Every structure is written in structure tokens, then in C-alpha cells.
Amino acid sequence: MALSRVERLQVWLFKALTGLLFALFRFFSPRGSAALSGKRLPPVGHPLLLESATQLARKIRRKEVSSVEVVQAYIDRIQEVNPFLNAVIKDRFAAALQEAAQVDKLIEEETGGEDVLEDRLPFLGVPLSVKESFSLQGMPFATGLVSRRGVVATVDAPPVALLKRAGAIPMGVTNTSELCMWMESHNHLHGVTNNPYDLERIPGGSSGGEGSILGAAGAVIGVGSDIGGSIRMPCFFNGIFGHKTTPGVVSHDNQHPQFSGRQEEYVSTGPMCRYAEDLLPMLRIMAGPKASMLSLDAEVDLKKLRFFTIPHDGGSPFTSPVSRELIDAQRKVAERLEADLGVEVREVRLPELRYGFPIWDTYITLRDNDGKPPRPFAELMGDSGPPAWPLWELLKWLVGRSEHTMAAIGLALMERTHHSKPAPFIIQQKEKLQREVEELLGTDGVFLYPSHPRVAPRHHHPLFRPFDFVYTGIISILGLPVTQCPLGLGEEGLPLGVQVVAGRLQDHLSLAVALYLEKTFGGWREPGGKP
């Protein structure tokens, strides 16, 4: 069914507004740093930086290497690359080294043997990076909002606490987009974060600082959150693995901003890492007592799974066409699955996907069961003070006086276009899509879907294509688990990748496919390395 006249007008208005905002941004904003133009990251020098967290933990338990050595190697790497990236906004290196020394002492005094340590403390002595929107005791907790400058976390968010309890050592916190609601990690408190593969491109958002430092080998495991693609886009743009967990499994308490309305049905917290073998043990820890909801210990025979591929959204007027490079990369995955496993990868088309943005935009603003709507973004921008006035902030921005980014101002402006009641047609399309996807996947199916229409864009260019995030956002609204997998480097030396989507609570299926894809396509590649 074609878009109605009103819907076509809404599309035109959205595109006109975003085009105007982008033009204003290009005209009034300062140019990028000439000092970084053409620069590349230093190559990875220390061999410990090229091992998974699982392997590092094993070596630490066996006293083949000390935790202090591992932590110091990562401190050195962060200090080497962060001036290029601006990914880590506050470190805790001194405390991390003290905790590493305590780990080494614990191992020396342990009498129960390696197996006891592995069972109790599976990531003992391994460095961890944390997205700054998660509460990490003693660290900044501002989420890029200038008015929250000086806010320091007093407790640990549950997933962070569980990873620390498993022996991981936090190294610091990483940059986000303003209030975690944009696909570029840029704010007026901590600045712009860069992509390690091309410093003039974005690392994604809102977990862009995590993606950037992981892709640069400045971290081995990290923590992210995702309601529209905030784990998956950074993982895609930075060539690493990430998992958006089935909603309701991993706690998202003690994050900022807090979720409201029905947003808790769509948000997920999950692991981000360079090596696929770390995904499942991280998820098992982060899920805590709810890990039993998932079949993480089940053996997965890939030859018995049903595979599908969806090459694009069917031509939505809101999104850019998927690039030929990414379509070809996804096709090669399907071909290798068929050749290696003897399975059939069936191409399917779901017409409702072309309504992905209106579906996401409608459901993210639905009222909760008590009839209470989500907290308006303008209120979040005002934090504990009065709500922001987006038109006034836009005028202030034009003269360099606003504390908010153009992306945040634009979102607050667009929020004013929402209807008081959701369109019945959009609700129908979402419900139909939900039924079709659940019937397609069952408990033994996975499908491949593009992560984004194109590889990592240049800085601020998403302002002109603000709805391309819906390739990840629609999966959030469907409440499905999905693993983002790298597929090597493309023509411009930038990471390629694909989403692997499974049925609700079938996270173990997409995680198993991730292991296969890492082995087949090489997984994470060092920035500046071979395609």
C-alpha cells in the first residue's frame, strides 16, 4: 500500500526540516580539525592487545601473564590513540592498576586451583570500558549534557556491577551522543569522537565512544545500550561485535536518561567486544539471575537452523538506498552459509519494513499502561531545570551560544510534530510485521539484515539522512535479539557488517552464527590493516 497524501507531506516536511538544519549546520559550524586530517592511528604494538578477554583471563589465571601487565598494556594503548579519537572522556588508570595488583595477589594466594577461579571470576583481571550513560561509581555521569557537568555516579549500574564482580577492571568511561539519542557521539561537554578507521568519520552513537576505543584496540570488552541501534551502529562502523539482547533480560537500571512510556519494552543493554567468543560469557554475566531466560548453554547446530536474508527495507521514502557494497557483502554471507553448511538461505521481502521509521517513531512515543507518555526530549534537555525551548536554542546555536547540539535541537523540534494519537495504519503495519517475523523465525530461524544503508558516514552527515538508523531501530521495536557482526573492510578501508536477527529469547542462535562469521570472514581487523 502506498503512502497517503498526508504521509507523503509528512515525509516532505521531515526532509525539508532536516535539509534546512544540515544547511545551517554546514554554514555556521566550525570546520573539523585540520590537525587530524589524513592522520592514521599508530599500529597495535603489544601482542596482549590482540587476544580476546576469554584468552586473557585464562592466561592471568594460569600466571602466564599478570593482570598488571594486561592493564598497563591497555593504559598505554589508550594514551596512544585517545588523542586521535576522543573516545575515553575520563579514565581511572591509577585505581585500575591497584585493582590489577590485588588480582595478581589473589591468584598467588588461591588454593582452589584454576577451575575455581574460572567459575567464580571468569573475567578476573581483564580490562573493561564503560559507556558514560551507565553509572560507574566515582566516574562522570552526564551523558553529554552541559548542565550535568560535575555529576558523578555514586553506585554501579547492575550490568557493570556484575562484570566487576566477575573480576573485570573498569578503565574509564566513554563518550556518547547528547542524551544518547543520536547516531553520532558528539556533545558540547566532551566534544566529538572519531572513527579509528577514518578520523573524519563518525564512530556511531550513542555508544560511539565504546565502539571507537574497542575498534582501536584500546579496549577488549565494553558495555553498551540500544533502543534504536546504539550498540549495533557503533559496532558496525568500528568493525567489532555487539549484541542487542532480548529486552527484559539485562537490567537497565542506573542509566541516564531513564526510560519512560513504553520504552522499556524496546531498550536493551548488551556486550560490545572485538572477539566473538567473548559475547556469550559477557551476556551470561550481565544478565545475572535472568540468564536462565536464555538458552545460553544449549549446543547450536548451525546446519539445523533455517536461514533467511532480507537485502533492504523495500524502498522506504525515509531511508537511503543500501549501497551495492553492503548488498554484496550480505550476499557473500548467504553464499558461504550455503556452501559451508549445506543450508538454504531464502531471500524474503517484508513490505511493512518500508514503514520502519513511522513505526519506530510511533512506538517509542506510546503511553505506558497507566496512560503516562514518555518524558519529552525537551524536558530531558533541561534536566532538573525548565524544559528547553528548541526554537530559542536554534537561534542561540546560530550565534554559538547554545549548550546543545544541532542533533538534539532538531530532535526536540521534530518531537513537536507528533500526533496526539498514533495512526491506526502504522499500528496495523507494525502488528502485521510482528506476526510475519515471529512466524518466519520461530525458535530455529535467523535472518540477515543490513546494519545501515552505508558504511560509516563523515562527521555530521547523518543530519542530512537522520532516518537511516531505522535499519537497526525497527528490530528494537520488534523486541528481537540481534548480533552485529563485522565482515572485513570495504573499498575505502572501512568496516563492513551485517545484523543477524533471531527470535525472541533465542539469543544463543545469533551468537552462534557470530562465531561462524568471525571464523569465515576474519572478524575485527586492525585499523589500517588488510581488507
Image: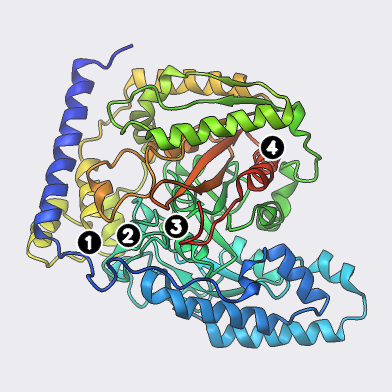
Label 1 vs 2, first from the N-terminus: 2
| For residue 332, above or below residue 93 | above
* SS label for mark 1: loop
Q: Could you tell me residue 312's position as x and y percent?
A: 42, 27
Q: Which residue is mark 4?
A: 509
Vertical position of residue 344 compared to residue 95: above or below: above
Is the C-beta separation of discs 2 and 4 under 8 Å?
no
At x 64%, y 88%, the residue is: 98
Q: Is residue 110 left or right of residue 302?
A: right
Q: Position of residue 318 (x, y in %)?
A: 28, 31
Rendered view: 330 above or below 462 = above
Quickly name the residue at label 3: 207
Q: Residue 438, located in which quarter of the rendered image?
A: top right
- Label 3 vs label 1, nearer the camera: 3
Q: Earlier in the sequence, mark 2 or mark 4?
A: 2
Which residue was labeled with disc 1? 404
Q: Amino acid at mark 3?
A: Ser
Q: Residues within 10 Å of mark 2 (few under 14, many from 20)?
A: many
Residue tagged 2: 178
